Image (spheres, helix red, strand yellow):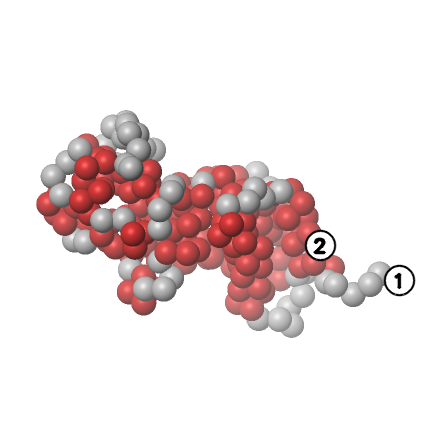
Amino acid sequence: MEKNIKILSAEPASAKPSTPPSRLKITEALKVLLRDKDFNSITTAEISRMAHVNEALIYRYFIDKRGLLHAVLSDYLQEFVANLTFDLKGIHGAINKIQKFVWASIHYYDDDRVFSKIQLLEVRNFPGYFDSETYQMVRKYAGLLMEIIEEGIESGDIRNDIAPSSIRQLILGAIEHCCLPAIIFDHKIDNDAMADNLCEILFHGITRKI
């Protein structure tokens, strides 16, 4: 049975003032449906009923259902990257910035499960995603981390005999792999503990201290 959930018409922070209200209703409707269902099981008819708009508008604004999914993910990523960029401005030192980056990423995955489901479970099995404009926001997110790593190498805080791209992939992969079980099985994440453990391994390794 379809839940009777009201779709708010208020404009999200990431939306432009000129965004049509019906477009906003469609993206909000998909977010609501994704709370309890996987993307492939959701139909455009369900989305239009939830949004109280004509189904044809989905194709007008987004071309198809997957285009809608990418638009929703893009909204999430724009907000996350903007907030993370702002938060990093007040932090000094590459190691401290990496700690903030790790904690903020884990927190965002844990705090909004619709975002984490889209990013970690729904889009990557579709090859076209990596050619999409939305993926460019993911690259911007990864680019923030690369800048921090390069800053650390320049300052001498991070060793220079490992490729920066490898360090970046290790950090990003560790964040996602640690969060993934909680996203799949809908468990709460202890953000502080997970971030502390990851950073301890990243900065000091797994060798027993003597």
Identify which amino acid the numbered label 1 is placed on.
Answer: Ile
Between 111 and 105, the residue placed more toward the observer is 111
Identify which amino acid the numbered label 2 is placed on.
Answer: Glu
The local secondary structure at tag 2 comes to helix
Q: Quadrant of the C terminus?
A: bottom right
32 left or right of 95?
A: left
Image quadrant where residue 152 sits: bottom right
Residue 210 is tagged as: 1
Residue 118 screen position, x and y as percent:
38, 51
Q: Compared to 80, does 95 lie above or below? A: below
Residue 85 screen position, x and y as percent:
47, 44
- Whichever of labels 2 and 1 marks the residue nearer the N terminus, that label is 2
One can see residue 18 in this view: no
Instruction: Work out which residue is located at the far right of the displayed protein and give it.
Output: 210
One can see residue 192 in this view: yes
The local secondary structure at tag 1 comes to loop
Q: Residues within 10 Å of mark 2 (few under 14, many from 20)?
A: few
Residue at position x 41%, y 56% in the image: 121
- The residue indicated by pointer 2 is 200
Residue at position x 41%, y 53% in the image: 119
